[in-house]
Each structure stands twice: as C-alpha cells, then as structure tokens.
Image (cartoon, grey):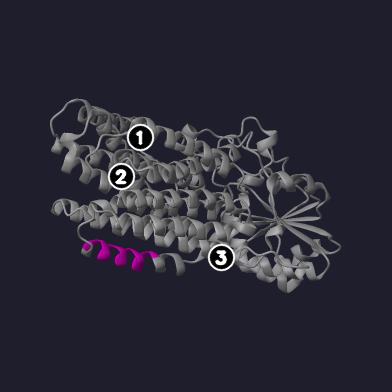
C-alpha cells in the first residue's frame, strides 16, 4: 500500500469500463431493472477487497478497527445483494398456455 | 510471484462481472448472471486473502461471519414490497465501507500521499460518507420510519450548497497544503455525512426511483476511486460498471418524468400546492361500489391493469393476480401496463407482480401498451395516479406537462381504484376522474378488488 498511483493505466481502465458499463446496461430490459440494481449494488461491494487489505494489514489499532468495521459492512452488502438478486430472479416465470 | 496469481485471479473476477451484466440483459440468462457476479466476488475475496500483505485473519474472519449473519436474513426474510428499502440499506453499507477505508488510509499514510492521491482519496471519502447517510435517510423514508413527503425549510438549497462547497474547499486544502491535517479531515467527514442528509431530506417518496439510482452510482464511483488509490484495476472496473449502471437508470427515471436531475434533487416536487384548478365542466366525482363496477366487465374482451405504488402499499399484488385469473378464465385478454417510474425503485412493479406469479410476458412497457389502449375495453388503475394523468398531454400549465404517461384515457372504460380523493404525489388533480367513462371506486385496493372478484 505504498506505491505511487499509476494514473494513466488506472484512467484507461476507468474510462473503458465506464463505456463498457454504459453499453451493457443500455440493453437491459426495464422488466429487470430492480434485479439489475441489486446486482450492481452487490458488485459495488468490491470495496470488500480494500477493506480486507486494511483489516489484515495489522498496521495499527486504527487499521484493525476501521478495517473490521469496513469488512463487516461490505460483506453485508455482498452477501445480501447476491442472495436477494437470486431470490427476485427466481420469481420471474413465463407460464405456458395462459 | 504470488502477486501475479492474485492479479490473474482479479482479471478472472473482472471478466465474470462483465459477463454477469451481459447475462442480466435477458430473463433467460439473468440468474446465471447473478451467479457469475457472486463467483467473481468470491474469487476476488479469496485472491485478496492470499496476498502476502495480509498478516492477521482473526478479525477478518469475525467480520465476515457477522456480515454474512446480518446480510443473509436481510436478503431472505424481507418481503418483496420492502425491496426498495433493502436496496437503500445495502447501498449504505457498501458506501460506509469505502468511506472507512479511505479514512484509515488518510490517517495511516496521508503524509506520504501526493496532492493527486489525496484529492482522489477525498473524493472516495466524500462520496462514500454522503451515500452512507443519504441511503440511510432514503431507507427511513421508504420504510416510513420518516415522513415520505419532502422535508423542507427556508434556504435549504443555499445550506446544501454551502455544506458541499465547504467540503470541497476542505478537500482542496487537504490535497494542496502539505502536512497532516487530522482535525480538518475529521471536519471534512462530518461535512460529507451532513451533505448526504441534506441531499435526501427534501426528496419525496415518488422521486425515490431516481435518488436510489444516483446513490447506486455514487457507491460505485467511491469504490472505483478506492481502486485508483490502491492501483487495483478490479476495484476500478467494478466500481465504474456500477457507476455507469446507476447513471443510466437515473437518466431513464428522469426522462420518464420529463424532469432534469437538478429538478429532482432541488425542485422538491410534491410540496407545491396546486393552484390551477382543472376544468371540471361542472362535473363532480361520483364513487361507485365494487358491485356496480363489476358490470363493466360484461362483454369485455381486452383488459389492461395499471399498477402503481398504492398496489405495493396495500400489498394487493396477489389479489390483482386473482382477478387476472378470474378474467382470463372468462376468455378475457389481460395485460399489465407498467410505467417506468411506477413504485419506489426502477422495475418495482415487475418484481411485485412476478412475486404474485404473474407471467412476465403479460407485463408490457409503456411504449408497447399505449397503442393498445384504444382497443381496450376496461383499464383497471390500481394505486396509480400521476402516471395516468392526461394533463401531461393537454395542459401546458400543469407541473406534469410533457411527462410520458400511460394513455388510459383512450380506453373505452376506466375503473379507477383509489384510497381517497387526495391528489397524487405531484399535488395535481387528475382529469380522468371527471370523464363520463371513468368509474371511481374508493377504498383500500385489496378490499375493493376482493369485493370485485366476489361480484364477477
């Protein structure tokens, strides 16, 4: 956690991923907007990676305290987000011969 | 050497996130998409734990167990009508994590960071904490712990901008005036938390679909900025995907209301006391009983049901499904007309009707259903109002003017189920109530529909 920021590469990833996201999301049917939002919410719990690095660094009491709180919060986000998305999607059924 | 494997695992996780959004495009592959996303997350976590920088696992283990113990019941036990508030709460937790990590980074190695790195750290912390309090407040409003009407006070926009301005000034100071500023950073956090509250306070219930989408984008951006700081491409990518998704959804919500971002955030619609009385042609509104209303289904061949937030509030989706079955068994073609902003989050109505086991091919989007209204015998409006108001087409002076609506006024007859005579969210009277082909039935949606089923 001590290196310089690699601005250009990071910006590359950020800009291209944003365009990719816009392309991908644009095609999602409105029918699925709620599960889409709970899926992207679950994906945003990727902050878990930074939280784990902080909590496990053993740098200081502050790192352990804030890191543990952050891991707890983002794992609630991750577990809850993926589980409810699946629960919602299981309900979408097309009935034959109505 | 380990680092290479970790980076490779991150790349796999990133690819899985992209695939998960791609598969989310269609109902047939959507569940697979969710699996891809969760496997991607699991890979990311395992890879991170394999990094040599991680020295102690005790507190990580404890935190993961607590997180799973809270997250699992939140996902499995909440009723489907509570999905909007659960989503808001989940945004709050994710954003809190980003804010806390940024805070620790500043206090641990703030002195060694350059100006650019500090600036991006401040952006991460600002977005993280404002999303945290903003989402908590949205949760309170959606769960009706707090009043759902906009909470207003004089000079509120000035106060909000002043707080945001101070936060940005503090961030610039932190970034460009070297030397650690522990106290200023604490002040900056307080401002971020406060701004989140001020942002959501004046926003009313029916604008929640937009706000929840914006908060979704902010949580993603915050994670992305954390990625810049850690030089972690996976965080940058996942955050950017989330950010663009929130952005697209909020733009679509604004378009569906014919309003701008600024108007949603600062316009405080729902407070305006309506002055322009609609032209009632001397008519008064007449209420009918469900038994009287049941007669309009005689000889009906095509029925469209238009649900709104009132259906969710009355938990009426299962009764709606029952009446659908009853009409279908009589040979009637039943469809649902779904407005993009019906309910409290994007796609809310679809989820509730899917829960009640309505086949999703009966759920028709606004653009597809509107041309069908002239051939529709009966439209049943359940707990919706503004999204059906013809004033959006006909009255340039109306606050709703220009908003795309479900053109139910073109149907042959309209059965309008309404709790009371109160106006809709926008505080505007609805011309539909005064049409001779409209039958108003007052009462709780569930009760009215049950009586209607009995009478059919």
**Mark toward the viewer: 2 or 3:** 2
Q: Earlier in the sequence, mark 1 or mark 2?
A: 2
In this view, the residue in front, B310 or A70, is: A70
Is B381 on the left or on the right of B86, as rendered? right
Disc 1: which residue: B156
Q: Residue furthest front?
A: B1
Q: Quadrant of residue B393?
A: top right
x, y percent for residue B232 = 34, 43
Please tell me whether mark 3 sits on a helix, a strand or a loop: loop
In this view, the residue in front, B249 or B295, is: B249
Do the CB atoms of the residues marked 2 and 3 lie less than 8 Å apart? no
Q: Earlier in the sequence, mark 2 or mark 3?
A: 2
The span from disc 2 to disc 3 (Cα, nearest Å) is: 34 Å
Residue located at (29% from left, 39% from top): B229
As drawn, the label of residue B315 is 3
Question: Magenta stretch: dominant SS?
Answer: helix
């Amino acid at each position: 956690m001590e290196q310089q920021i690699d601005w250009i590469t990071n910006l590359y990833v950020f800009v291209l991923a944003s365009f990719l996201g816009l392309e991908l999301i644009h095609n999602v049917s409105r029918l699925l907007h709620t599960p889409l939002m709970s899926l992207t919410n679950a994906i945003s719990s990727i902050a878990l990676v930074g939280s784990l690095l902080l909590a496990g660094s053993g740098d200081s009491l502050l790192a352990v305290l804030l890191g543990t709180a952050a891991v707890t919060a983002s794992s609630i986000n991750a577990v809850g987000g993926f589980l409810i998305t699946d629960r919602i999607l299981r309900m979408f059924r097309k009935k034959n011969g109505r | 050497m380990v680092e290479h494997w970790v980076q490779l695992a991150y790349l796999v996780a990133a690819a899985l996130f992209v695939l998960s959004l791609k598969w989310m495009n269609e109902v047939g592959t959507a569940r697979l998409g969710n699996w891809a996303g969760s496997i991607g997350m699991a890979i990311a976590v395992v890879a991170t734990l394999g990094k040599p920088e991680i020295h102690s696992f005790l507190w990580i283990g404890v935190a993961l167990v607590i997180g799973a113990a809270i997250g699992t019941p939140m996902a499995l036990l909440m009723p489907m009508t509570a999905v909007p508030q659960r989503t808001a709460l989940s945004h709050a937790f994710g954003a809190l994590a980003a804010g806390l990590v940024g805070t620790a980074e500043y206090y641990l190695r703030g002195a060694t960071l350059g100006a650019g790195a500090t600036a991006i750290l401040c952006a991460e912390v600002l977005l993280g904490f404002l999303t945290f309090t903003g989402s908590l407040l949205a949760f309170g409003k959606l769960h009706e712990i707090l009043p759902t009407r906009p909470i207003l006070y004089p000079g509120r926009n000035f106060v909000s901008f002043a707080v945001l301005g101070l936060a940005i000034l503090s961030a610039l100071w932190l970034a460009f005036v070297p030397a650690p500023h522990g106290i200023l950073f604490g002040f900056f956090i307080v401002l971020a938390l406060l701004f989140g509250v001020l942002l959501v306070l004046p926003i009313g219930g029916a604008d929640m679909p937009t706000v929840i989408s914006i908060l979704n984008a902010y949580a993603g951006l915050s994670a992305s900025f954390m990625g810049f700081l850690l030089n972690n491409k996976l965080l940058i990518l996942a955050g950017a995907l989330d950010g663009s998704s929130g952005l697209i959804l909020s733009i679509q919500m604004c378009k569906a209301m014919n309003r701008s971002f600024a108007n949603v955030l600062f316009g405080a619609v729902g407070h305006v006391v309506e002055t322009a009385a609609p032209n009632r042609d001397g008519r008064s509104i007449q209420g009918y009983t469900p038994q009287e209303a049941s007669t309009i289904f005689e000889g009906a061949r095509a029925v469209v049901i238009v649900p709104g937030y009132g259906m969710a509030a009355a938990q009426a989706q299962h009764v709606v499904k029952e009446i659908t079955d009853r009409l279908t068994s009589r040979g009637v073609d039943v469809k649902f007309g779904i407005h993009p902003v019906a309910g409290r989050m994007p796609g809310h109505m679809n989820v509730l009707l899917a829960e009640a086991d309505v086949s999703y091919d009966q759920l028709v989007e606004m653009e597809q259903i509107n041309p069908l209204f002239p051939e529709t015998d009966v439209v049943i409006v359940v707990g919706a109002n503004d999204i059906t108001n013809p004033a959006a087409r006909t009255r340039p002076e109306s606050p709703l003017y220009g908003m795309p609506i479900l053109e139910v006024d073109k149907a042959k007859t309209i059965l309008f189920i309404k709790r009371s005579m109160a106006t809709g969210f926008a505080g505007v009277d609805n011309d539909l109530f005064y049409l001779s082909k409209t039958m108003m039935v007052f009462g709780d949606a569930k009760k009215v529909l049950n009586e209607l089923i009995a009478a059919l």
